[in-house]
Amino acid sequence: MSPAHITTIVREIPIQHNAAEHAESAHDCFALIKGRKPPGVCSAQNADGSAIRSTPTSFGSDAYQPVASQTDAPRDSSLRHQRQSLVIPYLAAPSFKLGPLTIHAFGLIVAIAVWVGVTMVQPRYLRAGLDGAIGERLNIWMGVVAVMCAHLFSVLFYFPNKLKADPLLLLRVWEDISSFGGMVGGLIGAVVFLWIRNPKMPSLTRWKYIDTLASVFPFALAIGRVACTFAHDHPGTVTTFPLAVSLRSAEAQDFIAGVYANAGRTAELPPAAVLATMGFHDMGWYELLYLSLVVLPVIAILNKRARRPGSMLLAFGLMYLPMRIVFDFIRVSDKRYSGLTPGQWVAGLSLFLLPLLYLRVKSQAVVPAPADKSA
């Protein structure tokens, strides 16, 4: 850069407003020229208040380009505000080696979630006056059926094209799982064990087991959503929402570009320069927040109160299912049937059935017989 350019920059910095501020601007410009300032935008101003800025440069490059525009300052201010408001960084799911095995964070966190759930529920069976041995067998039945259904639900309804291309995918139960499929499978396992394997068990006792499980499940689910937050396996649309995951990094931009490409929606993405100032909705992250701040406190309060059998399952369903219906509308690539995702269909049907089921359980409550006054 020539001395004439440097003189032009310093001469055009106004001194009638805040001398200290402009001196700092001039110092920044000189630091950039001398190679002491990281690449960025030099924020000097013309006398009329419009910005004089350089394009982003490498250290010591002679690529300064003065720009005089009445709209540059507001635009830059807006971009800086967006960058500051998107504070959730994009973090890729970590993994590490254990001998010949590769341990992925997602699988490890899910395993921790299962362990926490089982550890929490066993003593609650006993506090509820239930048989702990029956509870252990119930846990196994529910776990096995939940894993199977989580995979089947995912490949049949979310990834039918993958299944068509590779029918053996149906047997690889460790791939492509769905949380809703797991929930449905867990309930199927409980029904098979409690109603079919134990036909003589009183109906209200069965519902005590179900309610005890429902009092613990949200805690395990919240831990599982930590895994989803790291894996970003429920991505939504790009946005400037403050809690969105930032797209500032090249890795994040490549990720969301791949998501949109797989959905055939690449044309909806903004230019790269704008995309870098935005974020994307992450349903796993949002659900973790909702569970932690809303569902878990309510469940903890209900756990301390006497309640009718079936009420805990109903309470969880009424809090969780509407949230899933709303969140699924902003997912990008989920398979849809008549405009709704498989999760939305299951959530809607469950919202309709759960109150009816609760009323049926409530009607089966034992009413004390009136005292015999003839004695």
Image (cartoon, rainbow, N blue to C red):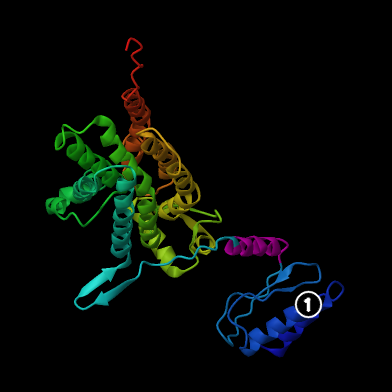
Name the side, left or right, on which 64 lies relative to 236. right
Looking at the image, is 90 positioned above or below residue 368?
Answer: below
Image height of 263 relative to 49, above or below? above
Kindly indicate the quadrant of the structure image that contains residue 326. Answer: top left
Residue 132: % across, % down: 24, 48
Question: Residue 269 location, x and y as percent?
Answer: 45, 55
SS for callout 1:
helix
Point 33% across, 57% down: residue: 116
Residue receiving disc 1: 22
Q: Amino acid at mark 1?
A: His
- 35 with respect to 319 (left or right): right
Assess whether residue 82 is covered by the magenta stretch. yes
Which percent across, then down, holds residue 120?
A: 34, 54
Frontmost residue, 291 versus 258: 291
Q: Is residue 204 visible?
A: yes
Query: Could you tell whether 336 is left or right of 327 in the image?
Result: left
> Is residue 357 shown above or below 108?
above
Q: What residue occupies the far top of the structure in this picture?
A: 374
Category of crowding for the residue at label 1, using alpha-carbon neighbours closer than 10 angstroms: few (below 14), some (14–19), many (at least 20) = some
Task: Identify the magenta region.
Answer: 69-84
Residue 233 visible in the shown view: no
Q: Horizontal and vertical percent for residue 47?
A: 81, 71
Dominant secondary-structure state across the stretch colored magenta:
helix
For the C terminus, which image quadrant? top left
